[in-house]
Image (spheres, rainbow, N blue to C red):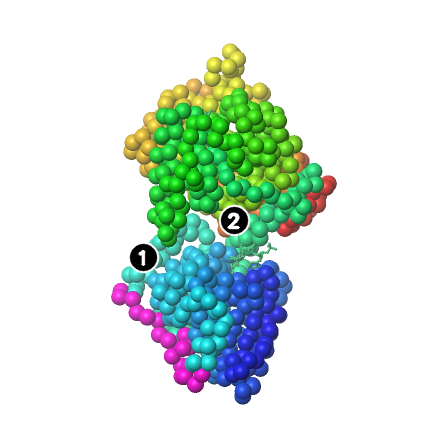
Amino acid sequence: MAQYARGSAVAVIRLRNPPVNALSRAVLQALEDGLKKADADPSVKAVMICGENGKFSAGADIRGFSAPKRLGGALGPVVSLIESSEKPVVAAIEGVALGGGLEVALGCHYRIAHVKARMGLPEVTLGLLPGAEGTQRLPRLIGVPAALDMITTGKHIPATEALKLGLVDEIVEENTIEAAIRLANKVIGQPLGPRRLSLKPVPKVPNMEAFLDEALAKVKRQARGCLAPELCFQAVRAATQSPFADGVRRERELFQVLLSSGQAQALQYAFFAERAVRRWATPGGASWSSAAPQPVRRAAVIGLGTMGRGIVTSLVKANIPLVALEQDLENLNKGRKAVMFLLEREAMKMEGGAQVLDFHNPARLQFTVDFDLLRDVDLVIEAVFENMALKKEIFHKLSKICKPGALLCTNTSALNIDEIASATNRPQQVIGTHFFSPAHVMRLLEIIYGRHTSPTAIATAMQLATALKKVGVVVGNCFGFVGNRMMFPYVQQAVFLLEEGSRPDAVDQALEDFGFKIGPFRMSDLAGLDVGWRSRKDQGLTGPSLPAGTPARQRRGQRYSPLPDLLCEHGRFGQKTGKGWYLYEKAGGRTATPDPWLLNFLSQYRDTHGIQTRFIDQEEILERCLFSLINEGFAILAEGIASGPEHLDVIYINGYGWPKHRGGPMFYASTVGLPRVLAKLQKYSEAHPDVPGLQPSAFLKKLAAVGNPPLKEWMSYLSQQSSKL
Ligand SMILES: CC(C)(COP(=O)(O)OP(=O)(O)OC[C@H]1O[C@@H](n2cnc3c(N)ncnc32)[C@H](O)[C@@H]1OP(=O)(O)O)[C@@H](O)C(=O)NCCC(=O)NCCSC(=O)CC(=O)CCCCCCCCCCCCC(=O)O
Ligand SMILES: NC(=O)C1=CN([C@@H]2O[C@H](COP(=O)(O)OP(=O)(O)OC[C@H]3O[C@@H](n4cnc5c(N)ncnc54)[C@H](O)[C@@H]3O)[C@@H](O)[C@H]2O)C=CC1
């Protein structure tokens, strides 16, 4: 757990807890024992602490936070013990020193890091604060502004930056352990007082109060309802106001608040959920453990519109050579310009810039209108218009041109993967890779297997997700897959609420206050209202194919709102036309303001359809939008479209701006309590019997009836499914 060894004058304590040397109780105990042994041994003149297998430590064992006897209080005293040692202690940081791992290093008198190491205090991302005195030591070492930045954002910084900040004393390119032992030998006998961070004053910032006020405003703005960043801030502020011991007491109080906040649980659930979905499985028995991916040495993207541009950018950033294809020269030139613009911007953010990305080299990025250039690629991602006939035509062509082993991926947002695959001679190599807009930014990659998709194809798409630094989530094939299918009833409720008396800004505000990055109407305006309009026309829900005499507010016996169609008929496509659910300063503008035209239009619409306007409170907005989305999630689980609730949650957090501190929709449902979700859906369903999305799913009813079991047990109530959390 932590191995103690004595060389010449330097004792070595090696943290050992694979895979990341997390600080479990046992590791901490062994560390404490090692320190005491070194202290008691007169032949030991200095101590070096390092981690096994090239990693210092990823911090406290997160799984231990939910254990009855938390490691909580144990870490702070061990860090103090290190600092108070009368023999110099040197931290040799390789790989990562995160959270409690970095706090251990801060207790050491000297820190030396490998040039490739990363450091950070990411507790805030788990809903916590660095509770082992890190909020008090770090500002003393690197100053308040830099410490606040690290502690309130949780960002990892590279060793080179750590050196500039003074977080480490030295960085090395070769053997860190040997360098640390050399340093330890060198500092034997030197006074330790100046190296003990708890004894240092916090460096002054001119006009500290004004600086802190401004920093707090920024932290609050970015937190969107998440508690941890503000409490992290308060802990650091305590360091500027109180002596070390009082600051530590304040840190502990704040830590306790966070520990019992519920948000910490949600964020830790999200951390493990993201890792659990890597272990994918299908109802047919294919799984991550047995499927091997094929290499992707060269790829192609077809269609350089909104999505294709981002996908190309992502592939270039992942260093995958590719061919980018458009339907004609005009679109090719437009697409090329857009891609180059994105790549230039990305390059500016990177060390080494355009040279590293090498996107001007045609061997790495080739633009063409010639399908023949796709002969030797290993993987194609199609991102043309959302039209089944067009997609089938393209896939038919691909199956004739591409080499036999090539994987054929579609970026469709809702269409049937099996039908697309039916146009090819290799349905086992056809798979959905659903990117989210903007594709080079959003982390989610929804991976959709069809009836014939092979395990190798799934494994290859998952490997691609990793290469693109995205979170791949494997799901089954149904209209809208998981994310968009759950989104339909949510957006539908939002529009129904407008019919009944609400306003776009009221609905958006309620959901943004809940923590969504952006409410449904702002989101529709951003994505373009015409996208859904086209899809509804294709489905025969509106437009010329709608049978004459169809009631305005009903389709196939269910409630339907023609409001979004009417807006499109008025040329209101959202931001791109300068007006949609909101008014914008110009076409392409981004500042949404409530539009008096729309409010008047809504009022006339209600009069036309004899709808009595009523006041709708925030609670009803939230319940109807969120519970209908969650309800669809239960139906998806029951159908085996996703293999566990964590899949749905990871999709919502990474693709739809669901507030992470609420753990995802299914986790949120578990915190509300399934009987309550059910009762509310029943109530709204009775009030709106023609809305199927409000009728509680059978699976939700079952789980409520069996006594509201914890989320990790849900799947055991369905035959042949198991949650992987
Ligand atoms: C480290 C990583 C960057 C590695 O990434 P990568 O290589 O991509 O691998 P992963 O797949 O992410 O990880 C591999 C594997 O390891 C698991 N894992 C990773 N980190 C941890 C961890 N810290 N603990 C446990 N397990 C971990 C991961 O889940 C994977 O396993 P799998 O799930 O089975 O696949 C990356 O993993 C990463 O970023 N990790 C998280 C780093 C992090 O966030 N660290 C901070 C941890 S929190 C911390 O250190 C808290 C503290 O400050 C200490 C607080 C305690 C002190 C409290 C004193 C106050 C007293 C108050 C009173 C309390 C009273 C009481 O106790 O009741
Ligand atoms: N826009 C979005 O937010 C999202 C869209 N999607 C899906 O991605 C796909 C593409 O959508 P967008 O990029 O928004 O569309 P878009 O309309 O912006 O771009 C489509 C591009 O495909 C090109 N194209 C059409 N026919 C072609 C052909 N035969 N050969 C080569 N290129 C051809 C067009 O010239 C155009 O540039 C659709 O299936 C859509 O449903 C998925 C996720 C999000």
**Residue 74 rendering spot, x and y as whole percentages:** 56, 71
Q: Which residues are magenta?
A: 188-207
Q: Which residue is mark 2?
A: 662
- Picture quarter containing residue 139? bottom left
Q: Which residue is mark 1?
A: 214
Q: Amino acid at mark 1?
A: Glu
**Few, some or many C-alpha atoms within 10 Å of disc 1 (few <14, some 14-19, many ≥20)?**
few
Against 205, is 6 above or below?
below
Q: Amino acid at mark 2?
A: Arg
* 601 relative to 677 in the view: left or right: left
Against 28, is 158 above or below?
above
* Residue plotted at (37% across, 34% down): 336
Is the residue indicated by label 2 positioned so its CB lies within 8 Å of ligand 1? no
Residue nearest the observer in this picture, 635 or 644: 644
**Residue 69 rendering spot, x and y as whole percentages:** 62, 66
* Residue plotted at (53% across, 13% down): 547
Residue nearest the observer in this picture, 494 or 457: 457
Considering every residue shown, the one lying at the far bottom of the view is 42
* 359 relative to 178 in the view: left or right: left
Considering every residue shown, the one lying at the far top of the view is 548
